[in-house]
């Protein structure tokens, strides 16, 4: 998971998420390796969320815009209400 450095500092100090925040999360398939740690075997999805003042993509979006990508890089359709 990634969050841009400026936003991370704000979230850590004030626990509010500022405008211009970008969050990226990858999900991977994995198996349990030696020492019972997880070993990734393949990329499953990439999720991206960005927040910007004035963005009102949908009612109740909270100024967030979201995208979901497959490992091939193509954008995947999804119900945006799952990202609230």
Image (cartoon, grey):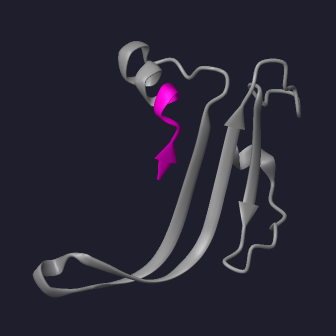
Indicate left or right for 69 with 30 as reference.
right
Residue at point 84%, 26% (across, down): 55
Residue at point 66%, 78% (across, down): 71
Indicate left or right for 79 with 37 as reference.
right
Say if residue 84 shows up in the picture.
Answer: no
Does the magenta-highlighted stretch encompass residue 80?
A: no
Q: Position of residue 14 (x, y in %)?
A: 42, 13
Q: Quadrant of the C terminus?
A: top right
Farthest-out residue, left: 35
Q: Is residue 17 above or below residue 70?
A: above
Highlighted magenta segment, given as a residue range? 1-7
Say if residue 62 shows up in the picture.
Answer: yes
Quadrant of the rendered image containing residue 18: top right
Residue at point 80%, 67% (across, down): 76
Indicate left or right for 15 with 25 as reference.
left
Q: Position of residue 4 (x, y in %)?
A: 52, 37
Q: Position of residue 2 (x, y in %)?
A: 49, 48
Q: Position of residue 54 (x, y in %)?
A: 84, 18
Farthest-out residue, front: 5
Quadrant of the rendered image containing residue 9: top left
Does the magenta-highlighted stretch encompass residue 4?
A: yes
Q: Is residue 50 above or below residue 36?
A: above
């Amino acid at each position: 998971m990634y969050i841009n450095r400026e936003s991370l500092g704000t979230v850590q100090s004030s626990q509010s998420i500022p405008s211009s925040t970008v969050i990226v999360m990858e999900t991977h398939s994995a198996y349990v390796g030696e020492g019972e740690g997880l070993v990734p075997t393949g990329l499953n999805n990439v999720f991206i969320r960005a927040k910007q003042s004035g963005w009102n993509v949908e009612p109740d979006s909270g100024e967030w815009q979201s995208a979901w990508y497959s490992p091939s890089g193509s954008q995947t359709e999804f119900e945006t209400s799952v990202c609230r």
